[in-house]
Amino acid sequence: MNFVKTPIEGVVIIEPKIWEDNRGQFFETYNEALFRENGIDEKFVQDNQSVSCKGALRGLHAQAGPHAQGKLVRVIKGSVIDVAVDIRKNSPTFGQTFHIELSEANAKMLWIPVGFLHGFVALEENTIFCYKVTGKYDKANEIGVRYNDPTFNIQWPLPQEELILSDKDLQLPLLADINNPF
């Protein structure tokens, strides 16, 4: 695996080594020792999966409190633009975003530590997105910020009229209006 640092401290792109032959391909999606050697020394407690239609935008979400979540994310079918937003109050990159295309074809993964909002938009029908998280789901400590908060100026790759959001995500507050626990 190749671990690539991003301009935002703590956010890491993981590129697996893919072995291919006439049967198909094989690659590791997680290796505790390799992750630890590359600065990701976390205990993962839950795996989640979503299936999204083209244009589905999920986010921007985070979980705080005793079950704050770091996330290792990847796509096993289709493709997304994945976005991490630094909301760590004392971070030199507070408010900055990082985005990457994650896809079935490139097999890249993204590590998003605690203290980040996370979201993605599906670029293909029936996109399957996987999350490996460090904290169990805790509704009482879930936070969110509106996907189009002007603080972040995220350039989502699809036109506004093609984005599909839940009612809950459409009603999320702006960053300035939340009690930021990070």
Image (tube, rainbow, N blue to C red):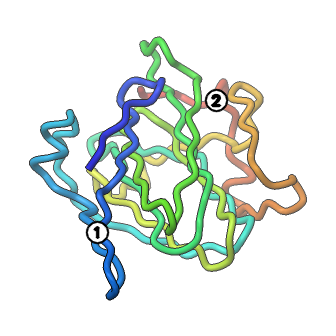
Q: Residue furthest front?
A: 22
Residue type, numbered disc 2: Leu
How many numbered discs sit on the rendered protein? Answer: 2
Question: Between residues 25 and 135, which one lies in front from this camera angle?
Answer: 25
> Dot 2 corresponds to which residue?
175
Q: For marks 1 and 2, give the CA distance.
A: 43 Å
Question: Whole-percent x and y of residue 5?
Answer: 38, 31
Question: Whole-percent x and y of residue 86?
Answer: 50, 28
Q: Nearer the viewer, mark 1 or mark 2?
A: 1
Secondary structure at badge 2 equals helix
Label 1 crowd bin: few (<14), some (14–19), many (20+), radius 10 Å: few
* Residue for point 46% across, 17% down: 89
* Residue for point 74% across, 46% down: 156
Question: Whole-percent x and y of residue 171?
Answer: 73, 50
Q: Which mark is residue 19?
A: 1
Left or right: 164 as drawn, with respect to 145: right
